[in-house]
Image (cartoon, rainbow, N blue to C red):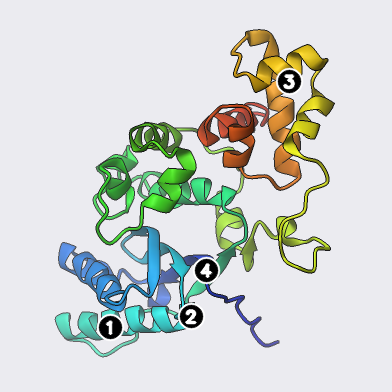
Amino acid sequence: MGRKPRVEFQGAIYHVIKRGNNRDYIFRSREDKEDFLKCLETANEEEVFNLLGYVIMDNHYHLIIETKEMPLNKIMQKVNNSYSKNYNKRHNRTDHVFGGRYKGILINDDKYLFTLLRYIHANPVRAKMHHNMADYGWSSDQFYRNNIKKQVHIDKILKMFSENRTVALVEYKNFMEQKEDIVKLKDFYEAGAVIGEEEQKNDNPSGSCQYNETLDEILRRVVANEEAFQLIKSGSRQRCLSDDKISYVKAAVEQGYTFKEIGKNIGISAVAANKMLIKIVPDTNL
């Protein structure tokens, strides 16, 4: 059976994964990792893509790339070929460096960017290389935490947390520390061709997003009465409204709204909206 063609179009965002040949360690030293980052930078000298996130492990890497005019396959060909050539020369070898073709998974909905970024930043923690993701020097986490705008395009995701950069940085750090609510992380983020495929299915021929209900209609449907609706819309933090807010977030997510859209409608941040959804996920460790 032939391989499925990748879904590629201008402005698409991909989770890119590439492993060493036979899962060999291909980022053995600091010099190797620095060279890979240099290859990424060189491939983007003319700003043909936005690098939204990355982590370099010992035998593989993860990238989050937003394409522009240049297709993903051309970008990755430049990066991988350059690194392979440099690696073989540096280590006096001629064998294949990478194994097979890279995996490029389309991110179909921006709401998955939050959790995908946390997933790749947490790789060194899951691999028991570090206790905290902030301690690992070979990921884009340092760029986000320190508001560094060089090489990594941090603005897109930070603005999804908040337009206020100070608030966004705090929200980012808090979100990175949250417990992941997806049970089979690797299956969700690394299997298949699309993340968020269900949200892509609609009958709208123009391609614009169509919802069954507006956010206010959803809110009115799930709350007990008009008074509760008005209190939530005004930003009230009364404890008695918590269950209504959680029901609202869950219902809105099910219709394909992003956490930023959901939160903005009731005066809270995208991260706060996400936390409400996490609260209703059952503890699978029992």
Residue nearer the viewer, 79 or 97 = 79
Q: Amino acid at mark 1?
A: Ser
Question: In the depicted view, which residue is nearer to us: 121 or 239?
Answer: 239
Q: Which residue is mark 3?
A: 244
Instruction: Characterize the local packing of mark 1: few (<14), some (14-19) or many (20 or more) Cα atoms within 10 angstroms.
Output: some
Q: Which mark is residue 11?
A: 4
Give the numbered dot on residue 249: none
| In this rendering, the label closer to the viewer, 4 or 2 | 4
Q: Are marks 1 and 2 in contact (CB under 8 Å)?
A: no
Determine whether, in the image, residue 36 is placed left or right of residue 242: left
Q: Residues within 10 Å of mark 2 (few under 14, many from 20)?
A: some
Q: Can you give x and y, in whole percent of width and height, for residue 275 in the image?
A: 56, 30
Q: Which residue is mark 1?
A: 82
> Residue 186: x and y, percent?
55, 54
Q: Residue at x 79, y 20 (%)?
A: 223
Q: Position of residue 31 (x, y in %)?
A: 16, 67
Evaluate whether residue 100 shows in this view.
Answer: no
21 displayed left or right of 134 = right
Q: Marks 4 and 2, how far apart in space?
A: 10 Å
Q: Secondary structure at mark 4?
A: loop
Q: Does residue 7 lie above or below 240 as drawn?
A: below
**In whole angstroms, how far apart are the C-alphas of marks 3 and 4?**
36 Å
From the image, state whether disc 1 or disc 4 is nearer to you.
4
Of the image marks 1 and 2, the number of the one nearer the N terminus: 2
Q: CA distance from mark 1 to mark 4?
A: 24 Å
N-terminal-most mark, 1 or 3: 1
Q: Are marks 1 and 3 in contact (CB under 8 Å)?
A: no
For marks 3 and 4 on the same chain, the one whose residue lies earlier in the sequence: 4
- Residue under numbered circle 2: 71
Q: Please report whichever mark, 2 or 3, sits nearer to the chain's N-terminal start.
A: 2
